């Protein structure tokens, strides 16, 4: 079984490959994503949210600034580079159980180009 750090590392690879199937495969059926002002729950909604992100920024590249893990919880700091926008303040908290993401918070400030 993958560790929490391995799950998040694989997830970032899938994001950078813009591989929606691989992204969705990291989440449980009842996973929850929490963003400022919104909540997405359940695998179909998680998949749709990432699909919309890929549509908006099909060339997005995410880079890890730091990753800290304890007891299946990962704090991820990241940056984003895309033709449409950049972000240098991405912060996610990702909860992993049994090698799958069950919960995630995400916050960043996109700066349009």
Image: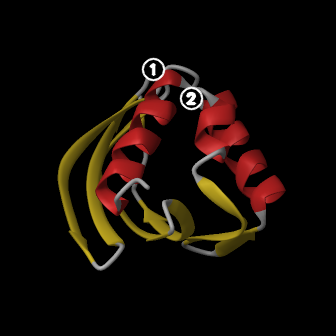
Q: Is residue 11 left or right of residue 73?
A: right
Which residue lies most toward the front here?
A: 1
Q: Residue at x 48, y 60 (%)?
A: 99
N-term mark: 1 or 2: 2
| Circle number at residue 92 | none
Answer with the quarter of the image where residue 16 lies: top left
Q: State the quadrant of the N terminus.
A: bottom left
Q: Residue at x 40, y 53 (%)?
A: 2
Task: Quadrant for residue 77, please give it.
Answer: bottom left
Residue lying farthest right? 44
Judge whether 16 appears above or below 75 on screen: above
Q: Which residue is mark 1?
A: 83
Distance (Cα) linking label 1 and label 2 = 7 Å
Provide residue 81's location: percent of width, then percent of height: 35, 30
Describe residue 10's horizontal placement relative to residue 65 as left or right. right
Estimate the x, y position of residue 113 in percent, counting from the top left. Answer: 41, 28
Other residues around mark 1 within 10 Å, as few (<14) / some (14–19) / many (≥20): few
Residue 57 screen position, x and y as percent: 56, 29
Report if the CB atoms under discs 1 and 2 are less than 8 Å apart: yes
- Crowding near the residue tagged with mark 2, few <14, some 14–19, many ≥20 C-alpha atoms within 10 Å: some
Answer above or below: position of 6 versus 99: above
* Total number of numbered discs in the rendering: 2
Compared to residue 61, the image places residue 41 above or below, namely: below
Q: Nearer the viewer, residue 28 or 54?
A: 28
Q: Residue at x 54, y 63 (%)?
A: 101
Residue corresponding to mark 2: 57
Residue in view at x 60 percent, y 27 percent: 19
Asked which secondary structure carries label 1, the reply is loop
């Amino acid at each position: 079984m993958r560790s929490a750090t391995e799950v998040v590392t694989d997830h970032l690879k899938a994001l950078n490959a813009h591989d929606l199937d691989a992204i969705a495969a990291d989440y449980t059926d009842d996973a929850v994503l929490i963003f400022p002002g919104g909540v997405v729950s359940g695998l179909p909604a998680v998949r749709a949210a990432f699909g919309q992100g890929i549509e908006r920024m099909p060339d997005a590249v995410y880079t890890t600034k730091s990753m800290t893990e304890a007891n299946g919880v990962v704090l991820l700091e990241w940056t984003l580079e895309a033709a449409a926008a950049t972000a240098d303040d991405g912060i996610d908290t990702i909860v992993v159980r049994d090698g799958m993401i069950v919960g995630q918070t995400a916050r960043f400030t996109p700066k349009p180009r």
